[in-house]
Image (tube, grey):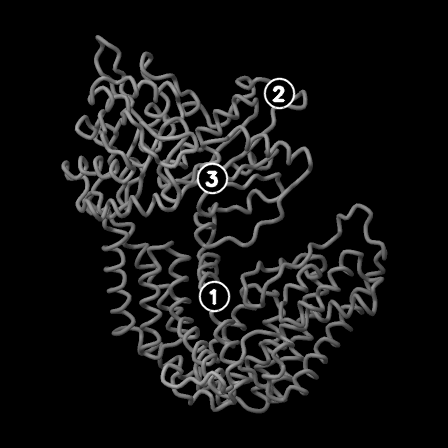
Amino acid sequence: MSDTITADLVDLDLSADTKEAAARALAERMAARGRVTDLEGFLADVAAREAQMPTGLDGGIGIPHCRSAHVTEPTLAFGRSAAGIDFGAPDGPADLIFLIAAPAGADDAHLTLLSALARRLMNTGFTDALRAATDAEHAAALIRGEKTAPGGPKAASGDTGADEGEADSEDTAPDDSVAAPAAVSAGAATGPTDGDRPFRIVAVTSCPTGIAHTYMAAESLENAGREAGVEIVVETQGSAGFTRLDPAVIAAADGVILAHDVPVRDKQRFAGKPTVDTGVKAAVNRPAALITEVRDKAARGETTEAAPASTPVERAGADGEGYGTLLRRWLMSGVSYMVPFVAAGGLLIALGFAIGGYEINEAPSVMDHFVWTQADSWGALLFQIGGVAFGFLVPVLAGYIAYGMADRPGLVPGFVGGAISLTINAGFLGGLAAGLIAGGVVLAIQKVNIPAALRGIMPVVVIPLISSAVVGFLMFVVIGKPIAEAQKGMTDWLAGLTGANAVLLGALLGLMMCFDLGGPVNKVAYTFATAGIAVADPGDSAMKVMAAVMAAGMVPPLAMALATTVRGRLFNRAERENGKAAWVLGASFISEGAIPFAAADPLRVIPASMAGGAVTGALSMASGATLRAPHGGIFVVPLIGNPLLYLVAIAAGVGVTTALVIVLKGLRGTTDPAGPATGEDTAPAPAAGGAGTSRETVAAQP
């Protein structure tokens, strides 16, 4: 940390009376040394971080900090105020102010050193020594972790571990909790729990910038754990990266503390444990209370449910995944973020047609003509809002495919590539290609060894500039035209489907919709259908495909609900309860209603569902039913062309699946109507969500 803080970055007589003035005074010292290139821009970033959450801490500490493109290298400035400055701490003004400035692309080594300082701030010996320091060089040496005993030479601590764990024997108290393993040993505890071993806690800490509070919270929890006599292991999800907790450690834990202000990565790891979920400052200011709270929850038997599917960034870094698995995850990332736009835009367009008639697409802009008392004006308004929402589909698809690959740096080139795809009429296929290319380009740029002076501007200038230029060139000049031709060919093929070909397509889509009940195969069919209607004036064939896909997706939950009604003895008590909910879920086009049944008995439920889905898809296409809305189930029947035959198609598929399930389960034998006494065979309740929402694939196991 020798180059992070020097004597001229220390002000032991800070005269500022507000946190803004204090930040400016310290930032001016950074600017004078060339560490900050734009003082006002940097101070704006500091203020923006401060607006997220006050940076004052108990014990008279203020720690304003941010990552900024205006910082050339990680820098720390220290100020000591005699009067105290209000940084929003519960216990009053701060007299020790640390301004931490990190480049937007700071390297891990420097960030690790800064995290070491954050941990030492939890050591009262360290802060007392800073209050007693008589000159700037002495204070800077203390912060750097150098030994400064009178009469002895100054010795650097040497490495990150020493920075974190070693302290001057005279000026600072030892910080054993950092140098030692994160787990507090039973021997260091005040006493074991339950007579044989201590209570065990795993924790995660993370703050928006991942520089200060993340590590201070970890240190605070570890110290409190030692005092409380518990074992605690903390995973710090900070800017310097993080090492995931050992799954065995999580499995052995009695409770979990999640202290965070940004999403916890891989949060689903902690499902089924007593959990306290709070902000990161709570772990800094009242760690003992959090430990008591999680122990109380464990004593009461309170546990968390399984976490929902995590975002691509939260799942990033899993080991052992093949390219096929990664590719599927990237594509599903784009589709899952696109689906809400599909649902909102599609339903608005459908409502516009329902209110204003099928000529509403020719209405003038509501900015030029809107009459409050005319239904046509309201129909035009809904139609035009839906059209705007639909305009985001391909850019969002491409942007979030790139996001799934390369995190936030992939968003800009992904969105740019998706917008270009619309411009050149490459459509949905172009969006897929643009997203994959954008993510690949960003990953390639990030592997280049960049000079330290440029790292601060990489995320906000260099990566967006280069990646957008490369993606734009490839889309406009190289691959855009062939993809546009392929898109046109697919559209023409779809429009030319009639008779037996249309029926076969409907059967195929029905099979796909019911194969994995929301998994990748289901998503392919659903996305194919929604891409066809994601235009202002979709063709008749595209609307037939949409109708067939939605009808088939409704079959599995409705069939399971019917089967539990007419032959309840074949299902246990939990399945019969799930069957009641499946009526509503199926009618709403929420295929999750069938997941508990498929998970418990996949070899009977999934084939039966696929058979019924194929029948429904084929009959829907044969009847010529059309649908302009991408969602809604039974509630958008008034918007369906040939609604009576459409309902007959759904009923036929439900009947086929119900009959097959009853026959197949009957061959297996009768289930005890009361259900298993222990509840071990009970299926989980279905999760709410649409057919287009992100869902886990049902594993086909007997």
Residue type, label 3:
Arg
Q: Are marks 2 and 1 in contact (CB under 8 Å)?
A: no
Residue 656, given in percent of the width and then of the height, sits at 74, 76
Q: Nearer the viewer, mark 2 or mark 1?
A: 2
In the image, residue 365 sits, relative to residue 10, either above or below, namely below
Quadrant where the image shows the N terminus? top left
Q: CA distance from mark 3 to mark 2?
A: 26 Å
Please tell me the numbered disc located at residue 669. Answer: none
Give the mark nearer the N terminus: 2 vs 1. 2
| Left/right of residue 463 with respect to residue 34 in the rendered view | right
Q: Are marks 1 and 3 in contact (CB under 8 Å)?
A: no
Residue type, label 2:
Pro
- How many numbered circles does the render carry? 3
Q: CA distance from mark 1 to mark 3?
A: 28 Å
| Left/right of residue 354 with respect to residue 556 in the rendered view | left
Q: CA distance from mark 2 to mark 1?
A: 50 Å
Q: Which residue is mark 2?
A: 192
